[in-house]
Every structure is written in structure tokens, then in C-alpha cells.
Image (tube, rainbow, N blue to C red):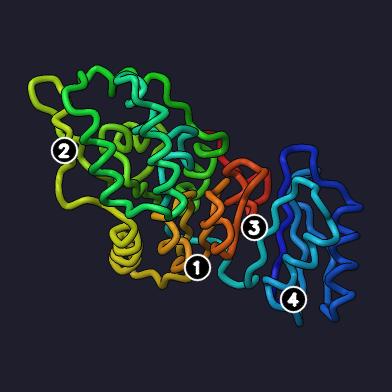
Amino acid sequence: MSQILTLIAPPGGLAAPDLARTREALAALGASAGTPDWLAPAEAADLPFAELAPDQAIAAARAALGEAPIDLIAQPAEGRRKALLLADMDSTIVTSETLDEIAAYAGLKERIAEITRRSMNGELDFRQALIERVGMLEGLSAEALERTWEATEMTPGAGALVATMRAHGAHCAIVSGGFTFFTGRVADRLGFHAHYSNTLLVADGKLTGKVGEPILDRDAKLATLKRLAAELSLPLTATLTVGDGANDLAMLQAAGLGVAFRAKPVVAAAARARVDHADLRALLFAQGYRAAEISAA
């Protein structure tokens, strides 16, 4: 079979009848559907198919499954395992938006979070929104950065994602519109090879309200993907990107597998692959990794 539809759910959320309904739905559209292959019991399975486009397979499966919290990723069977992972940080590798959390120490979290929300949904220019939000924090003690880091949580599955891909020879990097103060620490904790982000300027122990140039934005994320792929002598088809915001969309669309992870509506609607229910191990299942192959964080 030339295509694979991967069904992924939170642990215990996927059952044999789900696979049977999906297989029947594909067959009803004239597809050849193979035997399901469990990657993780009650959590993830592959369903090989042919004679149907990936988007048609996903639409048919979604109609068959209704509102069940099951993620669906369809792609060519060949070349599923990727050699480069490029991941957004905020609300992707970590559960929070770190700039919003810094703003809490200035009493501005709700105000800044609303600008963040609009920017990540593509309603505002990312560069200008970043400059505006950081400018509002001028004079805030740099201690707020450390306190924010202490409260920052890794997204479930992030450590396993990086550890497993590294164990199989992939290069793993963070690319973020956030700040080096955080991306460096996240990279160290989870084992990313590299991190690329913005610099939050500090002077005399306080935030200056400025961001170092050049600012890493949507275009820079795509450029980073292309540069790393070239440096590693990889085609873009061998790359995996993941993110949630509008500034991630260009790199999601350019990668061999670009996954919108619990993404903003504009991103979820435009991305070819999305994960709304499972954790970040879903990106491993999408590559065909079995539960026994997944490394501990």
C-alpha cells in the first residue's frame, strides 16, 4: 500500500471497532485498505491504504469516527521516518507562552496574552506584536525570567520525542519566536542539538523593553528549516516540523511532515497534519515508531 493513515488517541482511547469503521469508510470510497497494524495497544495504529488522496482518507475517517478524540495523520508510506526535527517552543514543547508568563510579574498578563493570542492566530503582524509586548515590560526586573522558568512545564511526550529521534540519528532543534533565555534551557533539559530564537535585552538587571535584532519571525523559521536541511544534505521531505501559531505555518507547510499541535484555528485549518488530542509522542507514531522503540526522556 502506498499510503498510511495513522490513528492516534490518548492512552486507552483507540479500539479495534474504531479501526474497523475507518477501514469500511475508506473502502466505501473505493480505496484498497490493508490490515491495521497496532503501534501501541489501545493508543496508535497504522492503516495502509491506496487509491485515495490523504485528505480524502482523513475526511472519510473523521466522518466515521465522529467526535471521538482520535487524531488522524495520512501520508505516503515511503520515507515516514524523518531525519530532522524542527520544533516551536511556546505552547508546543512547553505548555505555556513564556512571554505571557513573564508579563504576569508586571501585572500585564491578560493584556499581553490577548496580543499573543491575536498574533498566534494570524490577526497581527508577528514582528510588531513582539516589539509591542516586550516594550510594555521595560523596567521589569530580570528576576521575572528566572521565576518564569521555574514554573515552566514541558509538554507531555516532548522528552520522548527528542530522545527517540536522537537515538535513531535525527538532528533535533528548537526554532522559536520566544527568547534564548528559555530555548537554551529547554534544549539542555530535553536534549535538542540546537536552538534558535530571539534575544530579550537586559541592562542593569532590568528588561530594556527591546528585542535584539534580527528578530526571528515566520520567515526566519522557514529559512531555518531550509538552512538546516541543506547543511545536513537532506531533502525537505525528510524533515518534521511542529508548532501551534501562525508564525509556524510556513515551516509546517514546507516540511515533509508538518504537524499543527493543539494549534490556533487558522493554523489547524491550513496544516496538512494536526494533533489535537494525543501528546507529542503522536509525532513518533506518525513516523511509524512502535511503543517498544520509544526512548524514555
Say which amino acid is labelled 2.
Lys
| Residue holding disc 2 | 210
- Determine whether, in the image, residue 260 is placed left or right of residue 134: right
Which element type, helix, strand or loop, lies under badge 2? strand
If you read the primary sequence from the N terminus, does the residue marked by circle 2 or circle 3 appear first? 2
Image-based side of 188 in relation to 165, left or right: left
The residue sitting at 54% across, 49% down in the picture is 263
Tag on residue 256? Answer: 1
Between marks 4 and 1 in the image, the one whose residue lies nearer the viewer: 1
The span from disc 2 to disc 4 (Cα, nearest Å) is 53 Å
List x then y, in percent, for residue 267. Answer: 52, 57
Neighbourhood count class around disc 3 (C-alpha, 10 Å): few under 14, some 14–19, many 20 upward: many
- Choose mark 2 or mark 3, whichever is in front: 2
Q: Position of residue 121 (x, y in %)?
A: 47, 51
Q: Are marks 4 and 3 in contact (CB under 8 Å)?
A: no
Which residue corresponds to the image point at 13% horizontal and 20% vertical from the top-left? Answer: 205
